Amino acid sequence: MRIDPINQDLIFFILLVAIIVGLPFGIRAYDRHLELKEITDGAKEFTLTGNAQRGWLLGEVQANDILSFRQKNVPIQHPVIEVFKDDQVVLKLRSSDVTHGFSLKAFGVYLSNGIKPGKTVFVPFKADRTGTFVFACNVYCGDIHQHMKGTLVVKDRPPSDPDKP
């Protein structure tokens, strides 16, 4: 049985459209699959997105969420992350525009390969000491590179109340 060339073209067109439409869903499902492997149970999870115009932004931010025609006087972000001592922490690092780096020297975190746009880099560590620690971009990324900093605050865990269960 032969398929009419017009029907054959239609079948190939529908198949092509299905692949193009389904591809982003497949990629996102694969990313979620990888994400589950990287995050341990009970870990405090934080997403940081690097942007060459705004600095580090807390949360997952897409490039089109922060682009505007009026880029003058855009505030530079300096996020503060607070955790308790001995918490397991996972930083999900992303970039919305160019390749960024990341360094949290106090906990031995130094990314030398960079954080590329559209990819997520997972950084797990244990907050094993109290204090205030600075994290920064360690790959030159633009005019405000020197201001791409944030703070990790590790506090002592409050004593549990004996009257509460």
Image: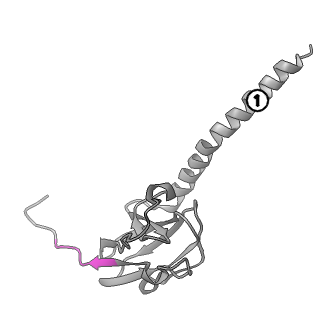
Instruction: Identify the magenta region.
Output: 152-159
Element at label 1 = helix
**Mark 1, residues whose alpha carbon is within 10 Å: few (<14), some, or many (≥20)?**
few
Task: Give me the residue at 46% from left, 71% from top.
Answer: 53
> Quadrant where the N terminus lies?
top right
Tell me the quarter of the image containing the C terminus: bottom left
State yes or no: residue 158 in magenta. Answer: yes
Q: Left or right: 1 with respect to 108?
A: right
Q: Which residue is mark 1?
A: 13
The correct choice, above or below, for 85 with respect to 67 in the image is: below
Residue 138: horizontal and vertical position, in percent?
53, 82
Quarter of the view holding residue 100: bottom right
Q: Position of residue 158 (x, y in %)?
A: 18, 73
Query: Against 28, is 45 above or below?
Result: below
Instruction: Choose top left, top right, bottom left or bottom right for residue 72.
Output: bottom left
The answer to which image quadrant residue 135 occupies is bottom left
Q: Is residue 5 left or right of residue 52?
A: right
Judged left or right of residue 160, residue 52 is: right
* Residue at the image point whose x is 68% and y is 39% from the top: 20
Q: Residue at x 48, y 84 (%)?
A: 108
Residue type at mark 1 is Phe
